[in-house]
Image: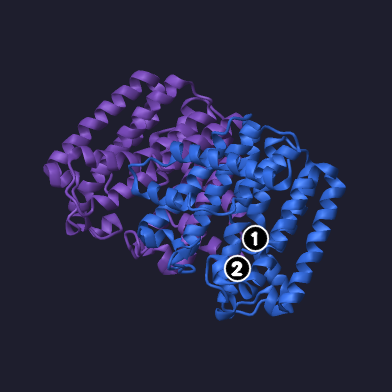
Chain colours: A purple, B blue
Amino acid sequence: MDYQEQYQNYLAQAMAALEKACGCFLPEESEVCRAARYSLMGGGKRIRAVLVLSVCDMLGGSMQAAQQFAAAVEMLHCYSLIHDDLPCMDNDDLRRGRPSCHKAFSEATAMLAGDVLLTEAFETVANAPADASVCVQAARALGAGAGSRGMVYGQELDLKYEALAATEDQLRLIHRNKTGALINAAIQMGAAAAKADEAQCRALEQYAYGLGLVFQIVDDVLDVTSTPEQLGKPIGSDSENGKTTFVTLYGAEGAMKLAHDLNQETCTELHRNFGEKAAFLEQLAQQLLVRKN
Amino acid sequence: MDYQEQYQNYLAQAMAALEKACGCFLPEESEVCRAARYSLMGGGKRIRAVLVLSVCDMLGGSMQAAQQFAAAVEMLHCYSLIHDDLPCMDNDDLRRGRPSCHKAFSEATAMLAGDVLLTEAFETVANAPADASVCVQAARALGAGAGSRGMVYGQELDLKYEALAATEDQLRLIHRNKTGALINAAIQMGAAAAKADEAQCRALEQYAYGLGLVFQIVDDVLDVTSTPEQLGKPIGSDSENGKTTFVTLYGAEGAMKLAHDLNQETCTELHRNFGEKAAFLEQLAQQLLVRKN
């Protein structure tokens, strides 16, 4: 199977798992749950879900457990987008070309929809068809990535540095927490489903944070080089907001060179640890580097 | 040990567990975490924590695991209060006689503080010093009680019926979800720490929902019979908001009689199932019935 076929295969598994989780956890009679479904099923690349599945697959683990973890991490990611879009945060009216959750429903409903997705993400992990020790390991990874020493801390730093000039170190700290931590959680949940050992988990953590940083640098570049049509959202928003990005630090070309170099390092190291089996994860990193949206 | 001493003993265990969880999960350098601490350590009866501990104790389970579950359920309860107080929800400026979280900090910080507490509640459960199967059982109970078929559904119903007259059945459905479900989660987490069997869990569930309903009826009564000083918050808010309550349905005296009768039933049934060992839980129910705030 080539890379694209494999990606589509993982994506199909992820979507089936999400549909199932919706059926279990988001009853139709609730407006809040309809809002959660609206956002959860509203598209997206599903990178985090694909990472859970591909890491588990690479390590020869249980795909059934991984599918449920994949649904969980997408639910968690979706909650973070809903809360991030609220008026008291980024106040974004559009998400993936559609009205954001609080615009399609109401602020109260959107906030509760986010709360539901966060809660049910953990319940989905706890209910996965796997040994209890696997579920606990995955729940710890998700908690560590999503909470006060991970994603939420990143959101806080992001708000804080909106008004202040950030150095490269500060920018890296924001991205490490805001994006890297949940990508790492996804990857560690895939590793948990495969009962990976400590050394494998550490090697995968390096890949996760490398991937997350490159993803953000490319995001910064696309914000100045892409078109609204390609991107599905307005461009130039970073510089309008006076935000420090890798482009303001190094220019678009310099930032892209940095992304290339970092990606090379990340993939070389992954290959050193996992050999030919790492092919899919290397290609995924490469695709995220050359993406147009 | 008499009831009051025993309560203080459980409370001390709960507070120690909360302090420990704060140290682990709420780093001082984060404003969001300081906001979470502000609300989490801002008082309250800690009924849910005491329920986790007393149920586990009654069944002879591991108090170390129960202590950590007790901290988790208080973190989860606290998140729900912070989000409930936000302008897009109940818009309450005061909580336990102090500025509510978004007044003391900001809306964005308060929302993220709630998100952190919800996330860390599950991580606290996953990290409890207990068999993985016990942690998974507790996480399932917490998820079921807090999510789309529990507390958040109750909050949604509560907002919905603010504008509509509710029947007794609708009122019971609101309270069952908004209050009962998390009380039941606390109790089932205590049962999980003691590896309770199915029959014990079912008997405890009856007690949980009975206790939750009586708690709410008494709340309705206190809103019309208490003073702001006793209650620590403004009185008469329900009738001002035109809300249906057990008092609007049956008057204060009728509602109190109903609470007495329900409490009697609940305690009799608990005693039938657990005998003398149920003494503390029966007295707790009695105290909640005759409370003045």
Instruction: Name the quadrant containing residue B108.
Output: bottom left
Relative to A25, is A182 above or below? above
Chain of the residue on which disc 2 is drawn: B
Q: Amino acid at mark 1?
A: Asn
Query: Is B270 left or right of A245, judged from the image as shown?
Result: right
Q: Which element is circle 1 on?
A: helix
Q: Residue at 42% across / 23% down in the picture?
A: A277
Q: Residue at 85% across / 54% down in the picture?
A: B268
Q: Are marks 2 and 1 in contact (CB under 8 Å)?
A: yes
Residue A114's spot in the image, x, y percent? 47, 56
Residue A283's spot in the image, x, y percent? 34, 33
- Nearest to the observer: residue B28 or residue A283: B28
Q: Amino acid at mark 2?
A: Leu
Do the dots labelled 2 and 1 sit on one chain? yes
User: Would you name the residue on which mark 2 appears?
Assistant: B157
Q: Residue at the right extreme? A: B272
Return the disc, 2 or 1, that comes first in the chain's sequence.
2
Instruction: Name the quadrant containing residue A102.
Output: bottom left
User: Would you name the residue on which mark 1 appears?
Assistant: B177
Residue A87's spot in the image, x, y percent? 35, 64
Q: Residue at 71% across / 33% down in the picture?
A: B61
Q: Residue at 75% across / 52% down in the picture?
A: B283
- Quadrant containing the C terminus of chain B is bottom right
Relative to B21, is B214 above or below? below
| Badge 2 density bin: few <14, some 14–19, many ≥20, Cα 10 Å | many
Residue A15's spot in the image, x, y percent? 51, 48
